[in-house]
Amino acid sequence: MASAVLPSGSQCAAAAAVAAAAAPPGLRLRLLLLLLSAAALIPTGDGQNLFTKDVTVIEGEVATISCQVNKSDDSVIQLLNPNRQTIYFRDFRPLKDSRFQLLNFSSSELKVSLTNVSISDEGRYFCQLYTDPPQESYTTITVLVPPRNLMIDIQKDTAVEGEEIEVNCTAMASKPATTIRWFKGNKELKGKSEVEEWSDMYTVTSQLMLKVRKEDDGVPVICQVEHPAVTGNLQTQRYLEVQYKPQVHIQMTYPLQGLTREGDALELTCEAIGKPQPVMVTWVRVDDEMPQHAVLSGPNLFINNLNKTDNGTYRCEASNIVGKAHSDYMLYVYDSRAGEEGSIRAVDHAVIGGVVAVVVFAMLCLLIILGRYFARHKGLFSLTSSPRIK
């Protein structure tokens, strides 16, 4: 916003005199009389102050321009566009653009609205006050344009764990340039942005280099845009698809207590998870052949009637297109009486403890009975034991 002082009344009169001198003789007198009369009607600018404010508006919305006068004395106010065409002279609109509408007209204000603002409406708009000397002030309309389109592109639809992939996000045709932020889930990451300008519009492209892990499978990569014309979060996202080699775990399903003895049966289940899911799960015995009485059924290994020759390490192997992995189970077969001896010892200890408890309880009961008996017969014992007096 700025103010300027236009040429004074005396300057206008001098210019009018020059123009009248160049006119034909028949019109010369009439021009001089007309200009002098108009100059006499122009009020002085003493004490009056013309001012306005800059306007920032989002494309497609409404801009409001206000020309205001302090200490007005009914001087004429007019509004001009950046091309110096009159939009409003007092409350009259010479410009044939129906997007301009009069909101208020008084001696102290000329307020005009501009609907459906476009980027071509940017620039300086001039408020003029017809005083002596005339005054002028301008307001600048700035138009904000949100991104036309927001696109995210991943270099590879499916990545392998440990691989570095490139992700790009483009915010097209905005004003001013946008700021792009990256997130992987809730974690913010840092990308590298480039800005291209064309015809006062900006296209921003941000690049993110991301090394993926198996934990990233199914996690969204989010491109978020920050721009003064955008309220809230404007974002787009893509979900990561990460392939990884199997994870293998061996579960003992029998015996339940975990103690393997001669003559017992053993059942192991191999659990393998990967992406893609492993289709081949195999059992091998490390450094030896599988026992002849072992039964293999998919991920399950069953060995009946265990004996000490079955001792060793049993390995479950799983693989997919990414790689392979394995897990080991070490088998040790105990004597058939190993568990029984422990059970017998436990039973013996329990029996001994029970007997001791019964004996202690019986002795306590006996002491209580004897105590009560002696308390009752205390007087009788005293009478029978004393000597007779003759």
Image (cartoon, rainbow, N blue to C red):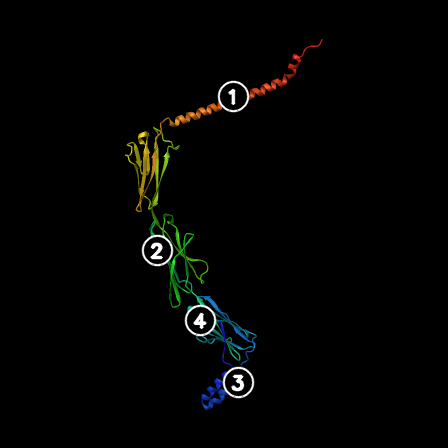
Looking at the rendered structure, the secondary structure element under dot 3 is: helix
Is residue 61 placed above or below 20 in the rendered structure? above
Pointer 3: what residue? Answer: 37
Of the residues tagged 2 and 3, which is closer to the observer? 2
Disc marking residue 123? 4
Q: CA distance from mark 1 to mark 4?
A: 110 Å
The local crowd at label 4, few if under 14, some if 14 to 19, many if 20 or more residues have their Cα within 10 Å, is some
Is residue 170 placed above or below 366 in the rendered structure? below
Q: CA distance from mark 2 to mark 4?
A: 41 Å
Of the residues tagged 3 and 4, which is closer to the observer? 4
Q: Earlier in the sequence, mark 1 or mark 2?
A: 2
Q: Is residue 62 visible?
A: no
Q: Earlier in the sequence, mark 1 or mark 4?
A: 4
Of the residues tagged 1 and 3, which is closer to the observer? 1
Amino acid type at mark 3: Ser
The local crowd at label 2, few if under 14, some if 14 to 19, many if 20 or more residues have their Cα within 10 Å, is few
Q: Earlier in the sequence, mark 2 or mark 4?
A: 4
Residue at the limit of the structure toward the top, as seen here: 390
The local crowd at label 1, few if under 14, some if 14 to 19, many if 20 or more residues have their Cα within 10 Å, is few
- Give 197 or 67, whichever is nearer the viewer: 197
Disc marking residue 166? 2
Q: CA distance from mark 2 to mark 3?
A: 76 Å
Looking at the rendered structure, the secondary structure element under dot 4 is: strand
Residue at the limit of the structure toward the right, as seen here: 390
Q: CA distance from mark 1 to mark 2?
A: 83 Å
Pointer 1: what residue? Answer: 359
State which quarter of the image contains the C terminus: top right
Residue 255: x, y in percent? 37, 32
Q: Are the residues tagged 1 and 3 within 8 Å (C-beta)? A: no
